[in-house]
Image: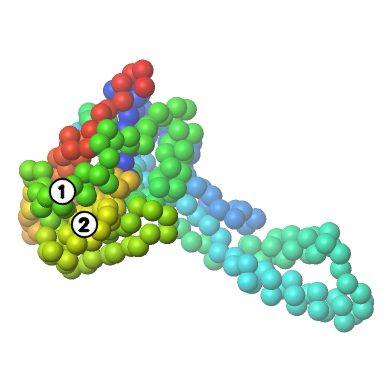
Amino acid sequence: MWFRNLTLFRFSESTARSLKSLESKLEPWRLRPCGPQERSRVGFVSPYGRGEEGLVHQVGDYALASFGREERLLPNAVVKDEIAARLKKFSEKERKKWGAKQRQRLRDEVIAELLPRAFVRTSYVSVYFAKKSGWLVVDTARRKLAEEVVSQLRRALGTFPALPLTPEESPRALMTDWLIRGKLPAGLAWGDECELRDPVEAGAIVRCRRQDLETDEVREHLKSGKQVFQLGLVFEDRIGFVLGEDLAVRKLTFLDAVRNELGDTPPESARAELDARFALMTLELERLLHQLEQGFGLPRPTERT
């Protein structure tokens, strides 16, 4: 259960203390099956898998939960084709056109008939709370989806003042400076990709992949005024990732040095495997998040924030 992307939020110590009864507060918001006339439904599911009971997996100061969504797949094209077929049949029989209100009523009838037969797609997003350090980590790089997860947590918890990151140092400016000077903070090494953009509206964009980032070719783009919007990095030879100017972590990869610590012995159960991987992942990410906190100035919210 390795996370692949990270969208980050921070919460205060008092908020962390309010998370003691997390599972009982999530229970009324468990994901229920999508009804025959419902387009979609959201809620929480067990991190152990659909059909399991527990909604929170706890390891020390870390708590893992899973946000789920069920949605009925009814493409607009299917609805339009069915409406067109019925209108054609009606016009051939009645020899007159339908007005706007009649068309809307027909559309509603078509959707009501087709929805119960539509396929249901289920998707999940994992999220964990680092209570001691005040991080909320959502396994997505899509800001809108991450905010939806946080909004659902607020509904379940009554209040959950988790805040988006507000860096004291501009990530774009810092990463551009790193690449211009060819020097990174301790613990970081170059990856093999970046995205450079001209900051003016509709400016040029350069994407480099499988590229040595310390070449003159890359520096020439920087000299022409382009700035770093995404930068591939490696942390302590253990974690590879691409850091965005929005501080979203993409393409997160735990390298062999980390995965080998799990050993070759098969786990006793799926829960034991989840427990081992989650414990290892959170400990590794805690060091990475501390690096980001120090490098970009990401203070934990105080009680007054």
Q: Residue 173 in the image: x percent, y percent?
A: 25, 44
**Disc 2: which residue:** 223
Q: Tell me what residue is drawn at x 46 percent, y 39 percent.
A: 152
In the figure, residue 37 lies in which quadrant? bottom right
Q: Secondary structure at mark 2?
A: helix
Identify which amino acid the numbered label 2 is placed on: Lys
Is residue 210 shown left or right of residue 51?
left
Q: 11 or 159: nearer the eye? A: 11
**Disc 1: which residue:** 178
Identify which amino acid the numbered label 1 is placed on: Trp
**Which of pointers 1 and 2 indicates the residue nearer the eye?**
2
In the figure, residue 170 lies in which quadrant? top left
The quarter of the rendered structure image containing the C terminus is top left
Q: Residue 284 in the image: x percent, y percent?
A: 15, 44
Q: Residue 259 in the image: x percent, y percent?
A: 12, 56
N-terminal label among 1 and 2: 1
Q: On screen, 121 above or below 157?
A: below
Q: On screen, 70 above or below 281?
A: below
Whether residue 70 can be seen here = yes
Q: Tell me what residue is drawn at x 17 percent, y 66 percent.
A: 217
Snapshot colouring: rainbow
Q: Tell me what residue is drawn at x 37 percent, y 33 percent.
A: 163
Q: Secondary structure at mark 1?
A: helix
Q: 237 or 183: nearer the eye? A: 183
